[in-house]
Amino acid sequence: MKFILITLVSLSVLLGISSCEKVIDIDLNDTEQKVVIEGTILRGDTLQRVRITKTQNFDESTNPPTVDNAVVTVVDNLGNAATFTSVGNGWYELTSYPGVEGRTYTLTAVVEGTTYSGSSTMPFYQPLAELLVDFYPFGTDTLIAVVPAHFDQQGIANYYQFHVYRNGIRDKAIFIQDDQFTDGNLTIQPLFIQDLVVGDSVRVDFFCIDKPVHSYFNQLSVNSSSSATPANPVSNLTGGCLGYFSARTFDTGTAVIN
């Protein structure tokens, strides 16, 4: 696909030089299609899920193509192994495989003959103590924020991620935290949700994640908010794919804005 970028270089007519036009031809060739893997192992006996898709061209607005014929397996550092089942639309699911704190999990996906793999260590569980709502004056307006309160485990580096749902729809923003300045303390950091109003119902899913996954989402957040040319965040998966694999703990809280 090609775009024509026209740059007008104008000089003052007082100098007696006419305006000129320069045409720059930018060729946005189709990029090599890559596999995208997004997978989690959650603490406890719950449903474990992995999704595999492929990237698409810059000008394509349809949903990304999915991969439904991969072989996806997981094993922990004690040798407990299992195989995911394809359930369609790129999703792979696994039951009766409880995630355990402190264990390191390795995910392997074989896609069209190519093997991708990555490891993640599950942090120790920390509950969401309370989900608060706060109002912040901002000029003539008032901003509404949800405030997940949680205690930080002292003496070790901790990393957190939040998924926020407004009236059942997940907010697309990336919410992550670390304990660089809050080690061992009660952490109360507001999350600002766009267009949040009185009467809305909010759910916050709270995850403890490891450092590589935090770094991945931090880079993804910077890319999405930067005016510079974005780059793919560094994945904890090998083999040349995009995405991440995260062994994580989970808690959740709800609140109504009133």
Image (spheres, rainbow, N blue to C red):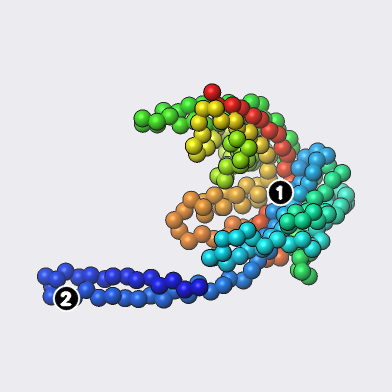
The residue wearing badge 1 is 246
- SS at mark 1? strand
Pick the front one: 116 or 12: 12
Q: Is residue 183 left or right of residue 52?
A: left
* Residue occupying the point 52% across, 37% down: 193
Name the mark nearer the viewer: 2 or 1.
2
- SS at mark 2? loop
Q: Quadrant of residue 161?
A: top right
Up the image or down, 59 lies above or below 2; here it is: above
The answer to whether residue 239 shows anywhere in this view is yes
Q: Quadrant of residue 139?
A: top left
Q: Position of residue 133 (x, y in %)?
A: 55, 26
Q: Position of residue 60 (x, y in %)?
A: 56, 64
* Residue occupying the point 57% across, 52% down: 220
The residue wearing badge 2 is 17
Q: Is residue 145 left or right of residue 117?
A: left
Q: Residues within 10 Å of mark 2 (few under 14, many from 20)?
A: few
What's the distance in space between the residues labelled 2 and 1, CA to CA?
61 Å
Q: Is residue 153 left or right of residue 137?
A: right
Q: Position of residue 165 (x, y in %)?
A: 61, 38
